[in-house]
Amino acid sequence: MFRNQYDTDVTTWSPAGRLFQVEYAMEAVKQGSAAIGLRSKTHVVLACVNKANSELSSHQKKIFKVDDHIGVAIAGLTADGRVLSRYMRSECINYNYTYESPLPVGRLVVQLADKAQVCTQRSWKRPYGVGLLVAGLDESGAHLYYNCPSGNYFEYQAFAIGSRSQAAKTYLERKFNNFTASSREDLIKDALIAARESLQGEKLTSSVCTIAVVGVGEPFHILDQETVQQLIDTFEIVREEETAPAEPEAAAEQDAATEQASGADQGGAGNQGGADQGGSPMDI
Amino acid sequence: MTKQHANWSPYDNNGGSCVAIAGSDYCVIAADTRMSTGYNILTRDYSKISHLAEKCVMASSGFQADVKALQKVLSARHLTYQHQHNKQMSCPAMAQLLSNTLYYKRFFPYYSFNVLGGLDSEGKGCVFTYDAVGSYERVGYSSQGSGSTLIMPFLDNQLKSPSPLLLPAQDAVTPLSEAEAVDLVKTVFASATERDIYTGDKVEIVILNAGGIHREFMDLRKD
């Protein structure tokens, strides 16, 4: 009822104790295309849904390398994300220059959060309209953080932000207990499946999905399109039924295979793939 | 009333010699590993060579604290370049950056005498030689440091390119094989060690070619 009166600038509280401009900034994050992150004990994987405006244009860059041990995926105003990535890179370089060691992830996210907070308490500024999933490795292990426009940050085992991220989050909520002990390959597979969930019906290909990995002995890097496509094909992600996990694996895959546009071949291969790898989407 | 002068100096000279030789498809960069102050040796095992970019190596003699600071600044700038351009800096680009960085401190210089060696964008060897404030030139070979007065005339004798006034224009690159160049470097350091007290202990030789980077050491006289 009062929303329109108290939302003109960020330095005005509403009677209910809310800052509407900050909340509107969080809305901007929800409008951006999905970004997903998951971590195990030794690796962190980031996945992004890359939607180009039109067939003629290139995809927006949503994953940025910040340092060998840190990378970030963004959702929302990508321009704000680019600027913050530049800040993060600069902080990492300066820390390394002074201390000859990599900047611990936890410290970087605090600096980032403080930077975002400043924009919520100056009348001549506006909050950053971007959410960041910060993936990194340091002495205390693998980390995944989410930085809000509000200046809050949280650590996660797995998280998804952006449009249709709820579908990805639902999938992650089911599987997250296994992530700590996951292998690198399984973690990437789960990231791809989560990305596919947020695509909701569209075909998952390497042209719409970007994957980046950081891990022990593995500097942060974005996987190239070919590798991602191979991974998608290898995992042979069959369209998953929205049914209870108790349903028999074979029956579900058969059903799923018949629904799949590609038809019997892929279904058959899907069965084989599931049996061989023992890690089909229906596994809990 | 005579002018008051400082009773301390911000600079020190840690001695040592550096050499770089460019070939048609390789580059050899070498420096001794002795670090000294006055008539004393601080350590026999200090590297004066820094691998700045994939195809670019710098050797610097002079005040090693300034050298270390310079290496760190260039390294940090290279990281930023990689983030912005999504590729490594080429050797000529790094050469210009080094010159600008040195001149930036024109009125409180880095006491660092540098030779930059690497492969240019065509894969040919290149060597750039500097003074302390950034004046630089691409050459076929060069030496800097305490032994340079002994080394440079010998290199001139062995390698000197024809005059740039000659026609047709001749390449600045030396027509030596990689093995011959490495051998020449070893000879040069052995000779410099004999007469320069600040050069000795070991020589670190870095070879850059299409196959990547290769490092070797050779013992020198320790006196």
Image (cartoon, rainbow, N blue to C red):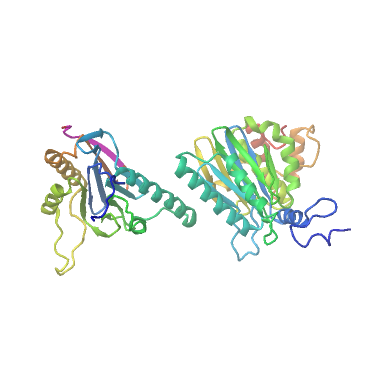
Q: Residue at x 39, y 46 (%)?
A: B72
Residue B219 in the image: x percent, y percent?
A: 20, 33
Quick one: which residue is furthest to the front in this view?
Answer: B1
The C terminus of chain B lies in quadrant? top left
Give, as a single range, the part of the protein colored magenta: B214-222
Instruction: State the residue in front, B117 or A56.
Output: B117
In this rendering, the answer to whether A48 lies above or below A218 is below
In this rendering, the answer to whether A122 lies above or below A269 is below
Instruction: State the residue in front, A52 or B204.
Output: B204
Q: Please say whether residue A1 is one of the residues in the magenta stretch.
A: no
The secondary structure that dominates the magenta segment is: strand
Residue A277 in the image: x percent, y percent?
A: 63, 33
Instruction: Give residue A19's quadrant in the image.
Output: bottom right
Q: Residue at x 18, y 35 (%)?
A: B220
Q: Is residue B106 left or right of residue A152?
A: left
Q: Is residue A283 visible?
A: yes
Instruction: State the residue in front, A272 or B153.
Output: B153
Residue A170 in the image: x percent, y percent?
A: 76, 41
The N terminus of chain B lies in quadrant? bottom left
Q: Residue at x 71, y 39 (%)?
A: A172
Q: Is residue A268 left or right of residue B141?
A: right
Q: Is residue B209 visible?
A: no
